[in-house]
Image (cartoon, rainbow, N blue to C red):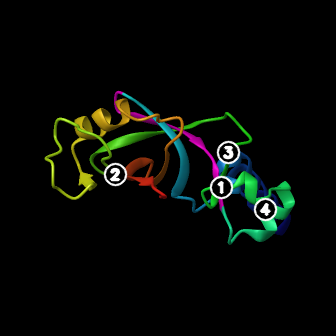
Amino acid sequence: MKKLLTLLILGLVSFVLFSCNQTDVANPNKDLYIGHINIVEDTLILDEVEWITDENQDRITELGLSQSDMPNGYYINNPSTDTVSFKIAEDTEYNFVVLQSLSFYKEGEDRNYSTTKKEEFMEFLNNVYSDKVVFWVEVKDGFVVSIKEQFTN
């Protein structure tokens, strides 16, 4: 009876471990991502990057970076073109900096703009070089709950 119970427990543990995908095992609690984004209908496609600043001295040394690689005080490391996708929630919060005239922006308003209107964010995305802009993406239960532009002067 003891052997049967041991085999049953080992089988159950093995099933649980092998049924998890590599992303789940590598990042079991990851819910904050940074990268370049694209939105198609209700899906966000994220090309994850690594945001490296002067505070990341070990990583700067590891990558062989110098100050000339970081003229604005940061370096975007994007070693892979792999992407991940998430569904966008209806109440996703979009935070970005308005640097040009957009139909929803009124001159004199705070340029740090926050909205839950996807169409406003899409207008913003269509007017910036989205492959150059980096966003923080917060995901909860598989849905995007917030997108925030990483803005540096």
Give the main secondary structure, helix, strand or loop, of the magenta stretch: strand
Which mark is in front, 1 or 2?
1
| Residue visible at 54% across and 53% down in the picture | 33
Which residue position holds label 2? 97
Amino acid under disc 1: Pro
**Distance from Cα at disc 2 to Cα at disc 4:** 28 Å
**Distance from Cα at disc 3 to Cα at disc 2:** 36 Å
Amino acid under disc 2: Val
Which residue position holds label 4? 60
User: Which of marks 2 and 3 precedes in the sequence?
Assistant: 3
Which residue position holds label 1? 71
Q: Are marks 2 and 4 in contact (CB under 8 Å)?
A: no
Q: Secondary structure at mark 2?
A: strand
Q: Secondary structure at mark 3?
A: loop
* Left/right of residue 84 with respect to residue 105 in the rendered view: right
Quadrant where the N terminus sits is: bottom right
Q: Secondary structure at mark 1?
A: loop
Please give the range of residues in magenta: 41-52
Which residue position holds label 3? 21
**Distance from Cα at disc 1 to Cα at disc 2:** 21 Å
Q: Are marks 1 and 4 in contact (CB under 8 Å)?
A: no
Q: Are marks 4 and 3 in contact (CB under 8 Å)?
A: no
Amino acid under disc 3: Asn
| Residue visible at 15% across and 54% down in the picture | 108
User: Which of marks 3 and 4 precedes in the sequence?
Assistant: 3
| Residue visible at 68% across and 45% down in the picture | 19
